[in-house]
Amino acid sequence: MNHAGKPGKTGSLMAVEVALARLLEMADASPIKARERLPLAQVQGRVLADDLISTLDLPPWPNSAMDGYALRVADWTGEPLVVSQKIFAGTAPQPLEPGTCARIFTGAPVPDGADCVEMQENADPQADQRIVFTQPLSPGQNIRPRGQETTVGELVLPAGTRLGPIEQGLAASLGRAELEVIRRVRVAVLSTGDELVEPGTTLGPGQIYNSNRMLLCSWLQRMGCEVIDAGILVDDLAVTRARLGELKDVDLILSTGGVSVGEADFLGIALREEGELTLWKLAIKPGKPLTFGHFRGVPVIGLPGNPASTLVTFAMLARPYLLRRQGVQNVEPLKFAVPAGFDWLKAGNRREYLRGRLENGRAIIYKNQSSSVLRSAAWADGLVEVLEDRTLVAGENVMFIPLSEVLN
Ligand code: AMP
Ligand code: MG
C-alpha cells in the first residue's frame, strides 16, 4: 500500500516544510548585506552580491567549431579551391578572397566573406594543394555565431547565486577578474554536554568523544562560512550564559545537544532569560527536537545531539537557513525519485531521512538507522526520504538526496 503523507496526520509534530518555511522567513528578516570584492580564484562557496551582467558578446566574433576550411558556399562549384590564408586561433584573419578557401582551426575567427566551415575530414587536398570538398555544404555550418553564449547587457548570473567552479569559469570567460560577494557568514559552533571530551584525550567513565563539533565545523568551512569554534559547553547555567555572552559578533550560534527534554537544557533557560526561544517538535527522523531563538539579539539554532540527527537537521534546516541569510533563493537540495530496494511496512509519524545508497538503480539503506550511529552516513551516499504516514514495498519510489548536494 502506498499512502501519500497527509498533513495533519503528524499530530502535534511540525512538518519539515513548515519548520523550513519559518526558518527561511527569519533568515529573510535578517539578510547579511555586507559584501567584499574578491579575486575570482577566492570566491568558491561564496554568494554573488550583484547581478553578473555581460559586458561582451561571447564569443566576440564568429569562430570555427572545427579544424577545416572556411569558404563561401556559393564559391563551391565543384572546381578545386585555392587556400588563400591560414587562420590559427588567436590571430586576426584577412577578409576571404572571393573564390578561395582558408585553412582554419578550432576557435579561430571566421574571416569576413566566409559563411561556412567544412571539417578537414570532408576536404580532399589535391596534388596542387587546392581543395575539393567531398560532401554537400550549407551556410552557417560549423560556425559558432558571435554572441551565441551571451550578448552585451545580458543577465548571466543573478545576485544570490552560489559560486562554484562552473560560475567561476563562466565569470572568467566574461573577463571578470574579481567579483563582489556577500561576506562570510560567521557561525559559532557549540557542543553541549557534560559527557563530551575532545579526541586526543582519554575517555573517563561515562564520557564520549565530541563528534558533532568536527562534523559541523568542517561542514561549515566547506560551505564558505567563518567558523568560530566555541568548544564544549558543560551543562551549567552560569557557564552557558557566560559563553553565549562572548559570542556577540556572530551571525548564528549553532549548538548541538541539550534540546531533548530539558532537565539539562541550560541553553534553553539562558535563551528564555535573555532573548527568546521556540522549541519545535519536528516530524523528522532522526531529529525531532530543534530550537530556534535569540540570545541578546543573536540568532541561535539548537540541533539535537545525536550525530545522525545533527547531520540530518543541519542538512535539511540549518544549511538552507544559512544560505538564505546570504541571499540564496534556491536553498533546498536537489532530490530525485528512485525505486526503493527495501520494504517499509510500518508507517511512522515522522518523515524519515534514512542513510542510504544507490545500488543497481535502487535505494538501499544502512542496517542500523539509530540516530546515534554516524557510521550510517559514512556508509551512505544519500538521504532516502520516506514521507510520514507512509508504507512502501521494494520497487515503489522514494526520494533520494545525494549527500554531495548538501555537503558544500
Ligand atoms: P542531548 O540532546 O544533549 O540529550 O544529547 C542526545 C544524545 O546525543 C546523547 O546521547 C548525547 O551524548 C549525544 N551527543 C550530544 N552531543 C554530542 C556530540 N557533540 N557528539 C557526540 N554525541 C553527542
Ligand atoms: Mg546533552
Image (cartoon, rainbow, N blue to C red):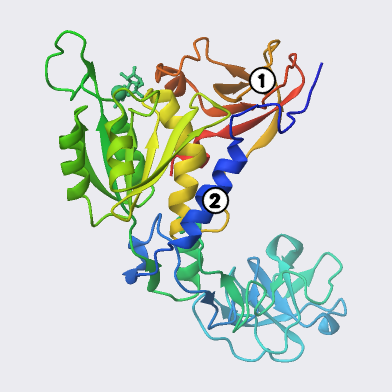
Query: What residue would you read off at disc 2?
Result: 331
Q: Secondary structure at mark 1?
A: loop
The one of 230 and 149 positioned closer to us in this rendering: 230
Q: Amino acid at mark 1?
A: Asn
Residue at image x 82%, y 84%? 75
Query: Label 1: few (<14), some or many (≥20) within 10 Å?
Result: few
Identify the residue at horizontal 65%, vertical 91% (top origin). Answer: 95
- Single out the mark in the foreground, 1 or 2: 2
Label 1 sits on residue: 360
Name the quadrant where ligand 1 sits: top left
The correct choice, above or below, for 138 with respect to 6 in the image is: below
Q: Please, what is the three-letter code of the amino acid marked with disc 2?
A: Val
In the rendered view, tell whether residue 321 sits above or below residue 96.
above
Q: Position of residue 275 (x, y in %)?
A: 33, 49
Whether residue 149 sits left or right of residue 100 in the image: it is left
Specify the quadrant that holds the N terminus.
Answer: top right
What kind of element bears circle 2? loop
Q: Residue, x 77% and y 21% (percent of image)? A: 396
- Checking the image for residue 75, the label placed there is none
Residue 327 at least partly seen: no
Residue lying at 54% horizontally and 78% vertically, measured from the top left: 53
Where the C terminus falls, by quadrant?
top left
Q: Nearer the viewer, residue 390 or 236?
A: 236
281 left or right of 308 in image: right
Q: Quadrant of residue 243?
A: top left
| Rendered location of residue 166, percent (x, y) | 50, 58
Q: Position of residue 401 (x, y in %)?
A: 58, 34
Residue 23 horizontal side relative to residue 220, left or right:
right
Residues at marks 1 and 2 touching, judged by CB atoms closer than 8 Å:
no
**Picture coordinates of residue 253 (x, y %)?**
31, 46
Is residue 197 placed above or below 54 in the rendered structure? above
**Cβ at disc 1 under 8 Å from ligand 1:** no
